[in-house]
Amino acid sequence: MKPNIYQTVVAKGLVETNCYIAACPETKEAAIIDPGAFSPGEAQTILDIIKQHGLSVKYIINTHGHIDHIAGNRALLKETGARLCIHADDADMLTSARLNGSEMFGMDIVSPPQDRMLIDGDVIMLGKLEIRVLHTPGHTPGCIGLLVDGTLFSGDTLFAGSVGRTDLPGGSEDQIIRSIKQKLLVLPDDTSVRPGHGPRTTIGAEREENPFL
């Protein structure tokens, strides 16, 4: 079952972050992935897509705890009544401006705490659609990828032609390369990769052309 996938670019004032909405095509149950919406207008853009397609948001999922991926959590949780999910190793970042990086930019932005802590191998159900959690530490300790019927939401672990930065607190160059090789490059070549920033790619293209790998 191929999911319906909708995308918007938010957090433009800080860094352009890809926010995705994945939905079961039959039940219209949906998850918002990485709502880095710093302004009411950016949050409203996401809500407009949800309304336009008649979706019912069951989960908000953060691929990791940096501010440009969690800034819209509070507003969207309030509007949708969804449950918030993040890997256990990044959970503390939600409620700490120092840990999530907003303090670096002179801001004090925090999220409500998670409703569900994720671990490697967890499955999140959207109607009849399965989202499989892949723990891919390296950019942060709790980075995850989300595999949904041939599509990988890679967060800030794998990009088109690049990999996530590892010079921030909790980052590890060795760990991110190991995560990519052991968890992501084992996926089929035609797996569509939707990263946290920049254009989409495929696993096959990154295996052959990514200079970091």
Image (tube, grey):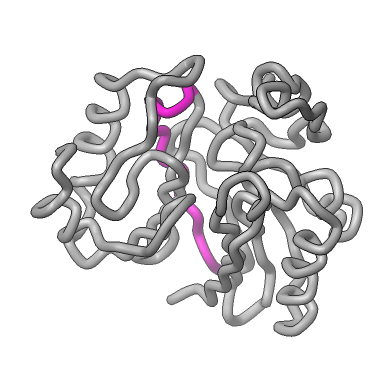
* Vertical placement of residue 169 versus 42, above or below: above
Would residue 206 be found to the left or right of residue 97 on screen?
left
Q: Is residue 140 magenta?
A: yes
How many marks do you count on the picture? Answer: 0
Seen at 12% across and 53% down, the residue is 209
Seen at 86% across and 57% down, the residue is 40
The image shows residue 166 at horizontal and vertical percentages of 38, 24
Q: Quadrant of residue 95?
A: top right
Q: Is residue 158 magenta?
A: no
The image shows residue 150 at horizontal and vertical percentages of 34, 65
Nearer to the camera, 138 or 61 = 138
The image shows residue 98 at horizontal and vertical percentages of 70, 17
Which residue occupies the extreme right position in the image? Answer: 78
Which residue occupies the extreme left position in the image? Answer: 208
* Vertical placement of residue 44 versus 4, above or below: above
Q: Is residue 1 visible?
A: no
Q: Is residue 65 visible?
A: yes
Seen at 38% across and 63% down, the residue is 199
Would residue 76 be found to the left or right of residue 172 on screen?
right
- Magenta span of residues: 128-141
**Dividing the image into 4 quarters, which one contains the C terminus?**
top left
Seen at 34% across and 49% down, the residue is 159
* Vertical placement of residue 79 versus 23, above or below: above
The image shows residue 100 at horizontal and vertical percentages of 66, 26
